[in-house]
Amino acid sequence: MLRIVRTAVVCMLMVAVFRPAARAKSITVTVSGATEKIDAFDEKNVTYFSLSGLVDIMGGVLDWKMIGHTVTFADDTSRFEFVINSPFFNLNDSTYNLTYPAVYNDGQLYLPAVSFIPFLDRVLTQKITWLQDRATIRVDSEYFNVVDFGVAQKANGLLVEIFLTQALAYDIFVTEGNWVNVSIRDGKINSPRILSRRDSRFMYTMKAHQVEGAGQISFRLKRNVEKWRHNLADDPPRIQISIADLDFELDTSTTGRPLGPDNRIDVIVIDPGHGGGDYGAIGPNGAREKDVALDIAKELAKLIRKDKQFKVIMTRDRDKALTLDQRADIANNAGADLFISLHANASVKRNVRGWNVFFLAEAKNDSARAVAQLENSVFFRENDAFRAHQEGQEYGGANDPILSIINEMIMTEFQAESHDFAMMVDREFRRQLDIPARGVDQAGFFVLNMVFTPSVLIESGFVSNKQEEKLLKSNKYHKKVAEAIYQALKRFKAKYEG
Ligand SMILES: [Zn+2]
């Protein structure tokens, strides 16, 4: 399966059928979350992609060779035979019509994605789909080794099972609020399948995500997790977690989900963005986003700490580097009721000004995407797999494949509450700040996506604008921003508590 044989016996007559690619471009291929680019072009609104490019990325699932006008791609059971400039092709013993002709250009065979991908899907063991609006070919392969999830009430407790394709090492830790977190080493998680198993009779919420070197599944149960044990069973391989009943009554309602672990809004996590070697944005006169974020965070913490109804936790209270994972872990382990990430914005256009409040949801416009890309860039630096793809990306463009992946992963838990809090901050900022209001917007921020509580990301001004850079360096402005957020926080508590 993994070998690629390329015997391109190109007859000289081929020159006659070369044609220049109309609107050369590349499209994205995602294979279980990782992205690659392959050559493509559009002709009369049809996207053609390089079949050899796709086959390479999929690990050489088909061998190919070219003799004269005929190009064949084959594995042990399937054999595709294309004729250059003809819409007809043979798959094993049958002839099919692609509607659009196969095109040979610059050493590669190009096929119309819209009509060919469905054929490929039939013969490969992987699930392969063409997403026209994202210009993406998505491959969901057997790559997953964490494949399913089940939860069931047993006579004296709850049985949770995580199904694997093979025995894998794992860690389980239970955190405040009856969160059960399972980290599976080298686990490749089939998130859509697993998240579809969420059962609201037993759990408030559930998350499944991929981190470097591990797959993580977290779920928050509607019962106390005090007495529990786990084991690795086989046939099929699975992790079993048994949670003994103490005083549990089966909850059949699906409403009334309280916020945070205990129905009170008291644990506030403040996250000053960036830090250490990650300076964030830098202003024309040297102001650094990491310092601005920390200064505002300190003022906000001071203000909230005076109010004894709250407990404040800062992800950092000095200049140090933190990964986005670490920030989220601090919030999740603290049982945060609200997560506030503080930043300052930047633009290549030096006259762009104003504050923004973001909550987590799929970005709806390019400027929101650009902010998400800027703030997510630390994630890409942390993750090798994404690094190569980060380079050479168009800055926050509408078709940015990385952002579309983030958008696919976005969790919608707490979206309403996050939006609500963002609107409360918006209201206070409009009242108290003198710089232009860019308002509330939504985008896919990694750090917010990993936090299991309502959360916002605040851009308190543009450090790239000289006027605002000056403000962002002033303690007076830090205090104003902090005061406005604090007012919003009190309103949020009043609304969601009790
Ligand atoms: Zn930032």
Image (spheres, rainbow, N blue to C red):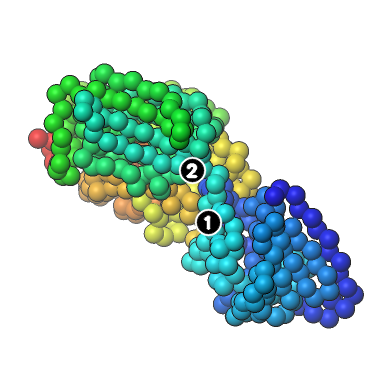
Residue indicated by mark 1 = 127
Q: Position of residue 487 (x, y in %)?
A: 20, 38
Residue most extreme to the left: 498
Left or right, residue 28 beside residue 451 = right
Quarter of the picture holding the C terminus = top left
Q: Position of residue 105 (x, y in %)?
A: 76, 71
Q: Position of residue 241 (x, y in %)?
A: 34, 27
Q: What residue sits 13% from the left and 31% below the top?
A: 249
Q: Amino acid at mark 1?
A: Lys
Residue most extreme to the right: 12
Q: Are marks 1 and 2 in contact (CB under 8 Å)?
A: no
Q: Nearer the viewer, mark 1 or mark 2?
A: 1
Can you say whether 496 is above or below 332 in the image? below
Q: Secondary structure at mark 2?
A: helix
Q: What residue sits 43% from the left and 27% below the top?
A: 233
Q: What residue sits 51% from the left and 29% below the top?
A: 168
Residue indicated by mark 2 = 376
Q: Amino acid at mark 2?
A: Asn
For this rendering, which residue is in front, 318 or 480? Answer: 318
Q: What residue sits 50% from the left and 25% below the top?
A: 169
Measured Cα–Cα span from mark 1 to mark 2: 29 Å
Label 1, residues with CA under 10 Å away: few <14, some 14-19, many ≥20: some
